[in-house]
Image (spheres, grey):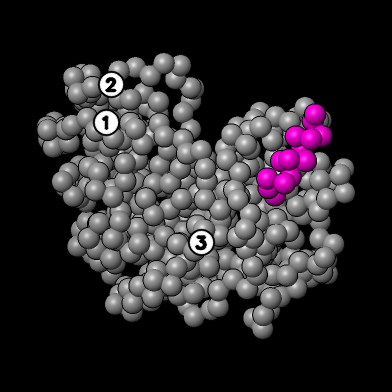
């Protein structure tokens, strides 16, 4: 089949693709779990291709009034700037005639959840029996397209299917917001103007190229589009015309969806023939300071340190493997390799990459997770995590600026406190641990 990559004749219109960290999810079916607000270790800042809510450059002290009249003034100004950059009148008219301000998008963008789902709750839905069953049905229905994408790009059909399932529940929930209106609303709101305008210019180029018309260019409130939630800049860089019809259609062509998703992973370092990772058993004396993505050893080295296989499949043979323990010493552990880190390029949350890997395994007939999750442990709220970070700083266990997010610095500070107090130093936050920290701080 003919594969078409189109960047268009007005590539100069686009800003450089931003390097972003995950703050929220693009589709309603994906939620960040407590232990995985950012990828463990923080060694690689991912260019998140379907990032829905990049961090605002500065807090807004007083939210300005946003209304339809102000939106139309912003659109008029943006149209002038876009025309000066070479965007055609035809494309601008198609994009902005009838364009409307969407207050709900401003509300969603400014929402900052106080509570996060525990990773086991997230995985229960992301890798549910219903999703596994539906995924197998979909891969059966589109076996030829899946096989073509796997053969061309070296990415297993089950991985493609897993991303499809987690991102949009196999196309049943990829959002119904008009992408132009969503991005223009975000640009007008002013909290994420740089990101929104970059994506809006890219969306205009997609219209100019004729890949999709404005009415069908739909997706999440944050501008992520189609079955596997490409933001516009990623669409321009990675989407392919797998079915050879002259358009890159990630909304209606499953061949294009699978090819584009596989191409994204291939271009971001997918290593054919390697697994993403596998559940493992850690030795009783395991040093959880080593359970970070920026600690990498060969499988043989981890095995020599006492890491064991969980079943007859054995340990994955990897030359650059990390151990992750999303629930600390309370739950299962996993050995992950370069392909896990490639999945993080799609969405920089450990919970997301783990869901994709585990769902892929189940789609291929492998068993689920053997270890038990600590389901009786309640998640800490964002406010409680900020309080914990503040107290650890006061006690001399530096965690950085308190932000309510469990990152590598916070885990390191927690482990230092646990070590000093004779506790298992796994860096996992619990209410009992917070109680001890408050008592120590007086």
**Segment colored magenta:** 428-442
Q: Is the Cβ of the residue at disc 2 closer than 8 Å to that at disc 1? A: yes
Front residue (pair 108, 272): 108
**Which element type, helix, strand or loop, lies under badge 2?**
loop
**Which element type, helix, strand or loop, lies under badge 3?**
helix
> Residue 188 sits in which quadrant?
top left
Q: Is 230 colored magenta in this rendering?
A: no
Q: Residue at x 37, y 27 (%)?
A: 193
Q: Residue at x 12, y 32 (%)?
A: 97
Q: Residue 253: in sight, yes or no?
A: yes
Mark 2 Cα shell of 10 Å, populated few (<14), some (14-19), many (≥20): some
Marks 1 and 3, Cα distance to the nearest angstrom? 31 Å
Marks 2 and 1, Cα distance to the nearest angstrom? 8 Å
- Residue bearing mark 3: 123
Q: Is residue 219 left or right of residue 426?
A: left
- Residue bearing mark 2: 66
Q: Quadrant of the C terminus?
A: top right
Q: Residue at x 35, y 62 (%)?
A: 169
Q: Which mark is residue 103?
A: 1
Image location (x, y in percent) of residue 354: 55, 60
Marks 3 and 2, Cα distance to the nearest angstrom? 37 Å
Q: Is the Cβ of the residue at disc 1 closer than 8 Å to that at disc 3? A: no
**Which element type, helix, strand or loop, lies under badge 1?**
helix
Front residue (pair 199, 331): 331
Image location (x, y in percent) of residue 254: 28, 65
Front residue (pair 45, 314): 314
Q: Earlier in the sequence, mark 3 or mark 2?
A: 2
Q: Main secondary structure of the magenta part?
A: helix
């Amino acid at each position: 089949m003919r594969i078409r990559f189109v960047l268009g004749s007005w590539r100069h219109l686009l800003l450089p693709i931003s390097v972003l960290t995950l703050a929220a999810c693009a589709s309603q079916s994906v939620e960040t779990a407590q232990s995985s607000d950012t990828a463990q270790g923080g060694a690689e800042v991912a260019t998140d291709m379907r990032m829905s809510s990049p961090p605002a450059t500065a807090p807004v002290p007083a939210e300005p009034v946003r209304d339809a009249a102000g939106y139309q003034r912003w659109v008029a100004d943006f149209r002038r700037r876009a025309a000066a950059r070479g965007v055609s009148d035809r494309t601008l008219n198609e994009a902005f005639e009838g364009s409307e301000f969407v207050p709900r998008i401003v509300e969603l963008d400014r929402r900052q959840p106080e509570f996060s789902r525990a990773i086991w709750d997230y995985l229960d839905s992301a890798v549910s029996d219903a999703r596994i069953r539906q995924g197998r049905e979909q891969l059966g229905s589109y076996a030829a397209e899946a096989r073509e994408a796997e053969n061309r790009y070296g990415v297993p059909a089950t991985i493609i299917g897993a991303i499809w399932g987690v991102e949009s529940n196999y196309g049943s929930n990829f959002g119904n917001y008009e992408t132009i209106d969503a991005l223009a609303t975000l640009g007008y709101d002013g909290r994420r103007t740089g990101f929104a305008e970059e994506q809006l210019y890219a969306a205009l180029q997609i219209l100019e190229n004729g890949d999709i018309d404005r009415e069908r260019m739909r997706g999440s409130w944050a501008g992520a589009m189609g079955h596997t939630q490409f933001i516009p800049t990623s669409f321009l860089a990675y989407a392919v015309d797998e079915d050879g019809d002259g358009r890159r259609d990630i909304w209606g062509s499953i061949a294009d969806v699978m090819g584009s998703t596989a191409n994204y992973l291939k271009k971001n370092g997918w290593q054919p023939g390697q697994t993403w990772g596998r559940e493992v058993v850690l030795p009783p004396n395991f040093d959880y300071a080593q359970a970070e993505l920026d600690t990498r050893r060969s499988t043989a080295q981890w095995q020599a340190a006492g890491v064991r296989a969980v079943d007859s499949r054995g340990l994955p043979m990897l030359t650059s493997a990390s151990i992750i323990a999303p629930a600390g010493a309370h739950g299962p552990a996993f050995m992950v390799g370069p392909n896990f880190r490639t999945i993080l390029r799609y969405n920089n949350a450990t919970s997301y990459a783990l869901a994709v890997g585990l769902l892929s395994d189940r789609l291929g007939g492998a068993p689920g997770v053997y270890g038990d999750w600590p389901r009786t442990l309640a998640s800490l709220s964002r406010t409680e995590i900020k309080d914990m970070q503040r107290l650890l700083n006061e006690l001399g266990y530096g965690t950085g600026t308190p932000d309510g997010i469990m990152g590598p610095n916070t885990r390191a500070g927690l482990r230092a406190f646990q070590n000093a107090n004779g506790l298992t130093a796994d860096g996992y936050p619990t209410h009992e641990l917070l109680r001890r920290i408050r008592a120590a701080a007086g």
